Image: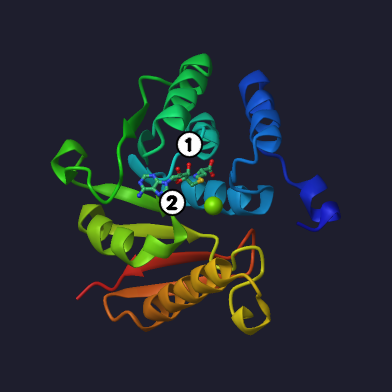
Amino acid sequence: MNEYIAGLNTLPTNRVIKSMIKYAKNNKIPIVNDEGLTMILLLVDIVKPKRFLEIGTAIGYCVINIALRDPVVKIDTIERNPALCERAVDYIAAANLSERVNVHCADALELDPDLLAADYDMIFIDAAKAQYINYFEKYKEKLAPGGLILTDNLLFHGLVGKSKTIASRDLKHLTEKIDKFNRWLSRNKEFQTRFFAIGDGFAVSRRIEK
Ligand code: SAH
Ligand code: MG
């Protein structure tokens, strides 16, 4: 993010947030960056979601920020890595948010959707990038009328759209998958989506009402 602009924005901060940022940095956990988080918090301020669903918790950084910003939102978040899940649960407890932030330790593509609420005003997709179409198709069923689906990392460190220049086969494959999702989403007839080159590439989708 432009440092001058970053200095003008204020994000939630406390002891828990600071220690999470340090932990994420030391352990290379890909938490949402300041610019992406600023966008999410702006949308939370406007939408005032009663329920928020996140796919891909990592250590709970994004959801703790949201719960600190909005004092009433109820959050469900799904994480498949048991060690990260445990970390997230501990940080959420340390931030006194256990009553409003619920971590589901499961693979989002396997989780029984009946374990979740029926209607989320915002859904944030931020798990394995190669599976984005699958998460989108599964969890759009959980979107409340007028709700938003947010997707992160559509540029994947600026590499999406530049796959010809990438030497690593796995990385090339991954960026092509993300590109495929981006195109699929932009052509999707059920949702209207706006794409932004902020954070690591970010999209906001709203279901087209019939
Ligand atoms: N949203 C977090 C960062 C998430 S990083 C934040 O901004 O603070 C992506 C996480 O998604 C990783 O922890 C990874 O383990 C998890 N993940 C990947 N695929 C998943 C799946 N199918 N189901 C649940 N979690 C998944
Ligand atoms: Mg992300």
* Residue situated in front as seen by the camera: 7 or 109: 109
Residue 147: image quadrant is: bottom left
- The answer to whether one can see residue 71 in this image is no
Could you tell me which residue is drawn at 33 percent across and 67 percent down? 133
What is the distance, in whole Å, between disc 2 and disc 1 at their CAs? Answer: 14 Å
Tell me whether circle 2 and circle 1 mark residues in contact (CB < 8 Å): no
- The answer to whether one can see residue 62 in this image is yes
Q: Amino acid at mark 1?
A: Val
Could you tell me which residue is drawn at 48 percent across and 70 percent down? 178
Q: Amino acid at mark 2?
A: Ala
Image x and y of residue 195, in percent: 52, 72
Neighbor class of circle 1 (other Cα within 10 Å; few <14, some 14-19, many 20+) is many
Q: What residue did someone put label 1 on?
A: 63
**Residue 108, above or below 181:** above
Neighbor class of circle 2 (other Cα within 10 Å; few <14, some 14-19, many 20+) is many
* Residue situated in front as seen by the camera: 72 or 128: 128
Sequence order check, earlier mark of 2 and 1: 1
Ligand 1 sits in which quadrant? top left
Image x and y of residue 110, in percent: 22, 47
Image x and y of residue 95, in percent: 53, 19
Q: What residue did someone put label 2 on?
A: 127
Could you tell me which residue is drawn at 59 percent across and 47 percent down? 32
| Label 1 CB less than 8 angstroms from ligand 1 | yes
Could you tell me which residue is drawn at 45 percent across and 28 percent down? 83
